[in-house]
Image: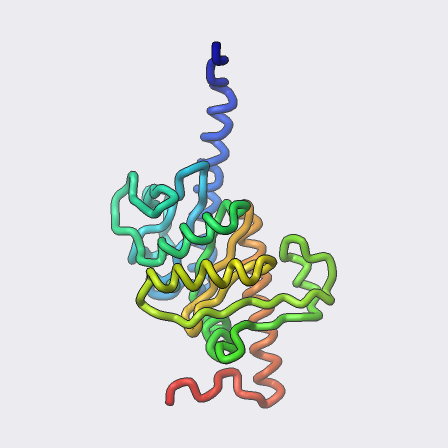
Amino acid sequence: MASPANPSATNERAESARAEIDALCATARWCAARGWVPATSGNFSVRNADRIYVTSSGLDKGALTPDHLLEIDLEGRMTSGNGKPSAEVALHTVIYRDRPEAGAILHVHTIWNTLLSGRFAPQGYVAIEGYELLKALSGVMTHAHLEQVPILENTQDYASLATSLAATIAAHPRAHGVLLSRHGLYTWGQSVAEARRHLEALEFLFEVEGRRLFAAGRPVVPDILE
Ligand SMILES: [Zn+2]
């Protein structure tokens, strides 16, 4: 006879899921305070077993609470909540499918990730090497590490973006994030805390690289608007 479900283990799982949702909302508000999700942009999610809790479309992330999250399944179908799923939900489901260790995903539109993703789109990645803060990325043990953050061309066709994201993730198995050109950064982690550490480190490094290029008299952005 099957043993009965362990109610205390079930409660513990529910509590840890609630704590991650609270941490996600706090992280979204922190991003808003830093100007990283302007004009209702950006989106955030956590995974708990076969459910994903994700911000709905058009929210001011500075006021985010758990009530603003939609519950969706791993295929992106809404199972609970009020609001409209963002078109970018398709990118979250690809990352959770192809990075099974990921428990949280953060997506922000910052000035430095927008500039650098445009500047380096022709080569397909931003290369960052030789900085102490690289060690904030999981598995990186030395400042000598070369981190390549791949860049995808931006499009409003999210089905094709999801396909190219899957190919890019497969081609860069050690990447901690992916940039969309002149759009923003997706990064992830096993927990909200790890994803937030990756986000803060990558954004710091993008700014350092951007300022370094600018100080060296090299254009941060090539002739992108011709
Ligand atoms: Zn976006």
Q: Nearer the viewer, residue 26 or 173?
A: 173
Q: Quadrant of residue 86?
A: bottom left
Measuring from the top left, give residue 194's x and y in whole percent.
57, 50
Instruction: Residue lying at the far top in this picture: please name it.
Output: 1
Q: Give the vertical position of 185 relative to 57 (above or below).
A: below
Measuring from the top left, give residue 186's x and y in whole percent.
47, 60
Question: Ligand 1 sits in which quadrant?
Answer: bottom left
Instruction: Please give the name of the residue rendered at 33% of the width and 62% of the height, measured from the top-left corner.
Output: 158
Instruction: Please give the name of the residue rendered at 33% of the width and 57% of the height, measured from the top-left corner.
Output: 60
Q: Give the vertical position of 109 relative to 4 (above or below).
A: below
Measuring from the top left, give residue 22's x and y in whole percent.
45, 42
Instruction: Please give the name of the residue rendered at 60% of the width and 68% of the height, measured from the top-left corner.
Output: 148
Instruction: Please give the name of the residue rendered at 36% of the width and 50% of the height, measured from the top-left corner.
Output: 55
Q: Locate residue 45 relative to residue 138 in the image: left or right.
A: left
Task: Identify the colour scheme used.
Answer: rainbow
Q: Locate residue 58 relative to residue 61 in the image: left or right.
A: left
Q: Nearer the viewer, residue 47 or 65?
A: 47
Q: Nearer the viewer, residue 54 or 27?
A: 54
Q: Quadrant of residue 43?
A: bottom left
